[in-house]
Image (cartoon, rainbow, N blue to C red):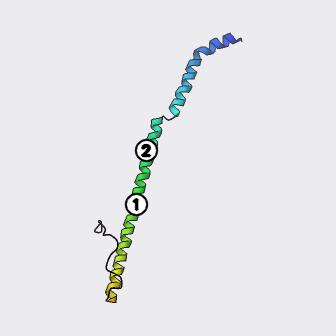
Amino acid sequence: MDLDTLVSKILPFLSTIILAFIGYYQAKAKTKSDKEKDEYDRLIAENNRTKSDLEYYRKRWRTAEDELDQLKHKVDVRSGTSIISNTNLKSERKDKNE
């Protein structure tokens, strides 16, 4: 079989094969907008997780502050005189009643 015969038999299918490969690789490769959307979704999920962690630690902080205030009050009541100063150096919490 000579080269001309081989080329004449393969040539009609060559464009179909090339288009099939191109279509496959285009479908497989993500576009830039898909990659940006995936990154955006990942950042949103991470942000939500961080917010929930922050709220958890804020609640723990409030609980610890309340326990500390109760202990200071108990010490003041037991001693009769104020061992611990009544002036509070920290600012009042806005959400103390929560």
Q: Is residue 65 above or below residue 17?
A: below
Q: Quadrant of residue 83?
A: bottom left
Q: In the rendered image, which residue does mark 1 sit on?
A: 54
SS of the residue under disc 1: helix
> Toward the viewer: 7 or 96?
96
Q: Residue at x 35, y 80 (%)?
A: 72
Residue 28 placement, left or right of 66:
right
Mark found first going from the N terminus, 1 or 2: 2
Give the residue at the far right of this rendering: 1
Image quarter hosting the C terminus: bottom left
Q: Amino acid at mark 2?
A: Tyr
Q: Residue at x 36, y 80 (%)?
A: 71
Please tell me which residue lies in front, 38 or 82.
82
Residue 94, numbered circle: none
Residue 59's place in the image compared with 38, above or below, is below
Q: Which residue is mark 2?
A: 40
Amino acid type, residue under disc 1 in the picture = Leu
Crowding around mark 1 (Cα neighbors within 10 Å: few <14, some 14 to 19, many 20+) is few
